[in-house]
Amino acid sequence: MKKSDRKGRMVFADPTHRRVFILAVILAALALTILYLKLFYPTTLIEIRYKIFEARFSAVVIYNRVFLVLMILNFVKLFAYAVAAKKSRPRKSAKTPTVTAVIPAYNEEKTIADTVRSVLRSDYKKLDVIVVDDGSSDRTLEILHTEFSSDGRVTVLTQKNAGKSTALNNGIAAAKGELLLLLDADTDIAPDAVSLLAAHFDDPRTAAVSGNTRVGNVVSLITMFQRVEYIRDFNLIKNGMARFNAMAVVPGALGMWRSSAVRECGGFSTDTLGEDRDLTMALLKKGYKVGFEPAAFSETEAPHNLRNFMRQRFRWTYATLQCIRKYLSCAFNPAKKGLGLVLMPDLLVFQTVLPLVTTVGLIGNLFALNLFELELISVSYIVAVCTELILFLLAKRVTREKIHAYDLLAVIPQRIVYGVVCTFLLFKAVLYAFLGVTVLWNKVERRGKAVRKEIPQLEKDKQESQPD
């Protein structure tokens, strides 16, 4: 390198290094200040410590009151979603727009064939399938050619490994359907799911519709916890959010999109790790309607162990922060309606700020050692856990899910464990965002066969879910 080139280069060109340097300078300054006071003014240090204790106790009291107000508002929000949630009333339309299913696949040899077969079993006739192989290094491409080369409804595209968003965009570019059924490669859908989703697009304002996703591989404690989460949070709360046109995300596990609206938004963005959440929010920003169909069922493979679960949820958490930053200008904006007045405040206040403040405040309570404040905060947590159980029972009634006895036993420990793990992941995501650390996709390991154990039961359960 030339001397002139070195002279013009920034000392900290990398923003991560710059932020670490700033933190190091602040910590060093604090350490030197404490050392100076201890050596030359020890009585001052005692006075400061006493004043800090007084201020800390006052801060804990203020925190507890603020926390209780936020918790009550959160309960009101959750019950508003639960009350607004639609009961399962399947409907079909006389219109039959063409539908193209686009399935991105990267190293999905264990699940891809079953996923494509489930789509081909659909009772919807105007349907074709495009599978985009994203440079798989396993037998995914070989299986696709072997199983479906003679089926004219299936098209297989290949590309160099470039990520899920790029694979989806390439599939969408080749799609001819008026509607797009976008599916993950580990998902099985019910035969009438496409028909039920397509019926929503009779309304020209509708740009996307989410289906009702179940966990198909309840094979461990962590997958049982996720089953409870999907029933309550994903399928009850999302159901209610759709009534306010504030759908958080149309997931890859089962979602249908209007192709013209997707192309209007430029397809799936590579700006975030949550391409489906990003596009959902982009559609809401443009004023489109995003719905939910509780009777359109699918089953997906959830992470089967804690390691894979934390990898997946960290990516989801980090992607949520990215989307909050991207659409921050919409927050509290009346012109953006559901996105600005419901979804963005929910993401900002209740899903980001509240968990962070709750954790910091809980630690403060433990150090304050005031019996009344500790009892107050303990009772509030007990009420919160009981509320989770009530919401789960409401989910059973509204979504007409088949609930097992062990689901009820799992509700309370699930919320406690999830609270700890998800808050840890949120702190980690905030730290990574501050430091500018690059977060990769971190694909979750699939088992394949575990998901298929409950698939024959899906149709029976769905028939039981029909209204009387």
Image (spheres, helix red, strand yellow):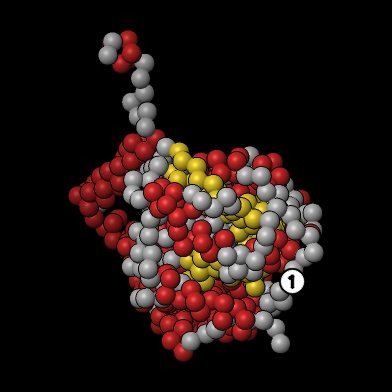
Residue shown at 70%/53% (left/top)? 98
- In the picture, measured across the screen, residue 393 lies left or right of residue 39, that is right
Seen from the viewer's position, the closer of residues 198 and 10 is: 198
* Quarter of the rendering containing residue 366: bottom left
* Relative to 17, residue 64 above or below: below
- The N terminus is located in which quarter? top left
Residue shown at 55%/71% (left/top)? 233
Q: How many marks?
A: 1
Residue shown at 65%/73% (left/top)? 295
Residue 456 point in image, percent of width and height: 49, 76
* Quarter of the rendering containing residue 402: bottom right
Res 133 seen here: yes
Seen from the viewer's position, the closer of residues 392 and 230 is: 230
- Give the residue pinned by disc 1: 91
Seen from the viewer's position, the closer of residues 404 and 432 is: 404
- In the picture, measured across the screen, residue 351 lies left or right of residue 96, that is left
In the image, farthest residue toward the left: 39
Q: Amino acid at mark 1?
A: Arg
Find numbered disc 1 in the image and state the secondary structure of the residue it sits on.
loop
Crowd class of label 1 (few under 14; some 14 to 19; many from 20; radius 10 Å): few
Seen from the viewer's position, the closer of residues 457 and 250 is: 457
Residue 151 point in image, percent of width and height: 54, 53
* Relative to 36, residue 419 above or below: below
In the image, farthest residue toward the front: 150
- In the picture, measured across the screen, residue 212 lies left or right of residue 57, that is right
Res 372 seen here: no
* Quarter of the rendering containing residue 241: bottom right
